[in-house]
Amino acid sequence: MPIETYQKQPGIAEVVIDHPPVNALDVAGWFALAEAVVAAGRVSDNRVVIVRAEGRGFCAGVDIKEIQAKGDEALIGANRGCFAAFAAMYECEIPVIAAVHGFCLGGGVGIAGNSDIIVASDDATFGLPEVDRGALGAATHLSRLVPQHRMRSMVYTAQVATAAELHHYGSVLRVVPRSELVDAAYEVAGDIAAKSPTILRRAKESLNGIDPVDVKLSYRLEQGFTYELHVAGVADEQRAAFVEKRDADTSK
């Protein structure tokens, strides 16, 4: 299974992404992640959820090969799966900590950007390669991690930001060596788990209520442009170039 849930300490649920080689989730994987996070938040004794990953990096986004092979069906499924997973992070009844290592790209930014707290390893990088893949999306969530103009430059160029940069902005709480990442996440989770579960749940609900941006509506708007690019045929060349490991024709 690409998503597993563990309960190693009282009050702390751990949801782990493990989908080699790069944790690029297929449609089923995105829905499984959503279900796991929602379920963890509904356990009355839980007070915090850690979302982390095994392997080379945190998450490389959607499975582009699946979309290229199946077309509309997979694209719609990926859109709906990502929407469900990001919403699950945001609406989880208790705080969510994203423990990020290596690459955090595309949908990975959606996961991290909709979490409550981010702890990252010193090798972590965050970025949206969507423009190079014939898609749009997760700028909504990247804008929660970096300032507006930095977000725009990252979208247009597909360049990444380091964990150290995000720590400077205040969106990453701690940056630690990779070998210490899980322990650091549990340390932060332990501080939260010591609080009243009832107050934590109301705190999460109240913070979402005062958020200046409706993240679900904003992301849904982005997804609409992704489908427009797909229907126009522009996205096909970008995805094919990625799958075939060649430079894309950017004349259109």
Image (cartoon, grey):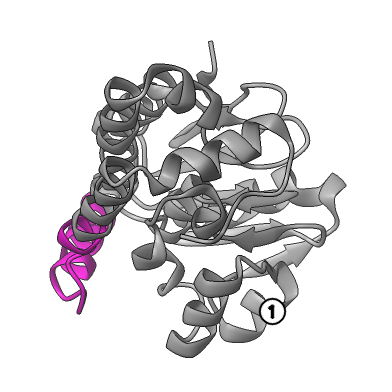
User: Residue pushed farthest front?
Assistant: 251
Using the image, determine if residue 237 lies above or below residue 203. Answer: above
Residue at position x 27%, y 59% in the image: 222
Badge count: 1
* x then y, percent, for residue 48: 42, 45
Residue type for callout 1? Glu
User: Which residue is nearer to you in this view: 215 or 177?
Assistant: 215
Q: Write down the residue under mark 1.
A: 165
Q: Is residue 238 visible?
A: yes
* x then y, percent, for residue 82: 34, 39
Residue at position x 28%, y 56% in the image: 200
Residue at position x 60%, y 65% in the image: 158
Magenta stretch: helix, strand or loop mostly: helix
Place residue 214 in its image quadrant.
bottom left
Write down the region rendered in magenta.
198-219
* x then y, percent, for residue 184: 70, 53
Is residue 199 one of those drawn in magenta? yes
Place residue 46 in its image quadrant.
top left
Taking the image as shown, residue 17 lies to the left or right of residue 123, namely left
Taking the image as shown, residue 19 lies to the left or right of residue 63, namely right
Place residue 93 in its image quadrant.
top left
Residue at position x 69%, y 30% in the image: 244
